[in-house]
């Protein structure tokens, strides 16, 4: 039931994640109008950060779930009980809601010129901060610290979980047993690789080429395509 609860939360977050950007993007294409209000932009920033970071935290919780299932199978039902899983989810939701609120409030303190052209298909926080007319030093500190903490921290947790999982699988004597244990992680590993791979690819390519158009195009992969593929990947599994 714990695994189902995590999958249900991931599906809900993926739906909300794509709903943050896709409807507005499709409306812009339909009406040939690429306009968004200031309030609408701040709202989009808030919900985009909220669901993007929740996606990361849920993938981390699912990595921990696989770690406990493979490395401590006899204690799985005791460790990953419904109450503990529910508590982890509640803490994640509350913490990320507050984090998203902090980033949105930090954006509100900035002053902008009368007309802005955002070189993106949605209001991306980094792009908005770069377009501000006021001092952005504090915003950059909070933004990059948040990326390191909320993005890098879970990634370290996922890598550690899989390091322990691989070590545990090596100790299984039969090839069939090894395959059966590792096959339970394939869906999760595919989703993690797709999400982090596209995210890192976007920011590394944008840093190398300095092309806002290529960055915006590549962002479609992790902001739209990846959340849509997640349910398909788990369904195939």
Image (tube, rainbow, N blue to C red):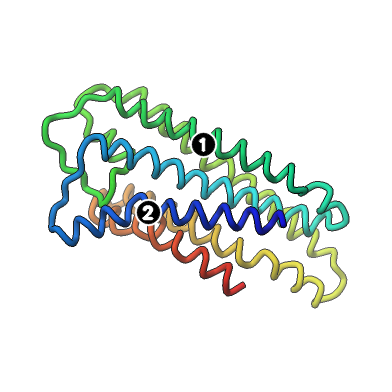
**Residue 114 x, y percent position in the rendering:** 11, 31
| Residue designated by label 2 | 19
Quadrant containing the N terminus in the rendered view: bottom right
Compared across the picture, whether 143 is left or right of 181 comes to left
Classify 232 as above or below 211. Answer: below
Q: In which quarter of the image is residue 166?
A: bottom right
Near-viewer residue (77 or 215) = 77
Classify 64 as above or below 37. Answer: below
Q: Image point 52% across, 38% down: which residue?
A: 150
| Residue designated by label 1 | 96
Q: Image point 85% across, 75% down: which residue?
A: 174
**Residue 222 x, y percent position in the rendering:** 41, 56
Q: How crowded is mark 2: few (under 14 residues within 10 Å), some or many (20 or more)?
A: some
Pick whichever of labels 2 and 1 is earlier in the sequence.
2
**Residue 202 x, y percent position in the rendering:** 37, 53
**Residue 35 x, y percent position in the rendering:** 16, 46
Q: Marks 2 and 1: which is nearer the front?
A: 2
Classify 126 as above or below 194. Answer: above
Quadrant containing the C terminus in the rendered view: bottom right
Tell me the element at label 1: helix
Q: Image point 61% across, 49% down: which residue?
A: 60
Q: How crowded is mark 1: few (under 14 residues within 10 Å), some or many (20 or more)?
A: some
Compared across the picture, whether 101 is left or right of 150 comes to left
Tell me the element at label 2: helix
How many numbered marks does the figure carry?
A: 2
Q: Image point 20% across, 43% down: which residue?
A: 36
Near-viewer residue (131 or 7) = 7
Q: Distance between the Cα atoms at labels 2 and 1?
A: 18 Å
Label annotation for residue 8: none
Q: Contact, CB < 8 Å: mark 2 with mark 1?
A: no
């Amino acid at each position: 039931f714990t695994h189902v609860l995590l999958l249900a939360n991931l599906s809900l977050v993926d739906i909300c994640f794509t709903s943050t950007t896709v409807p507005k993007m499709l409306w812009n294409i339909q009406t040939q109008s690429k306009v968004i209000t200031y309030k609408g932009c701040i709202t989009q920033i808030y919900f985009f950060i909220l669901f993007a970071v929740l996606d990361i935290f849920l993938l981390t919780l699912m990595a921990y779930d696989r770690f406990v299932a493979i490395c401590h199978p006899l204690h799985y039902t005791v460790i990953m009980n419904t109450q503990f899983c529910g508590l982890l989810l509640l803490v994640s939701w509350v913490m990320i809601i507050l984090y998203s609120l902090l980033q949105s409030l930090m954006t509100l303190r900035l002053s902008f010129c009368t007309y802005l052209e955002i070189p993106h298909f949605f209001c991306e926080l980094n792009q908005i901060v770069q377009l501000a007319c006021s001092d952005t030093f504090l915003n950059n500190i909070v933004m990059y610290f948040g990326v390191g903490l909320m993005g890098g921290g879970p990634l370290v947790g996922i890598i550690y979980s899989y390091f322990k999982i691989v070590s545990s699988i090596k100790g299984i004597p039969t090839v069939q047993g090894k395959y059966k244990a590792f096959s339970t992680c394939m869906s999760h590993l595919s989703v993690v690789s797709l999400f982090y791979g596209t995210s890192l690819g976007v920011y590394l390519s944008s840093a190398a080429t300095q092309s806002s158009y290529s960055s915006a195009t590549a962002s479609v992969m992790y902001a739209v395509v990846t959340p849509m593929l997640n349910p398909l990947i788990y369904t195939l599994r």
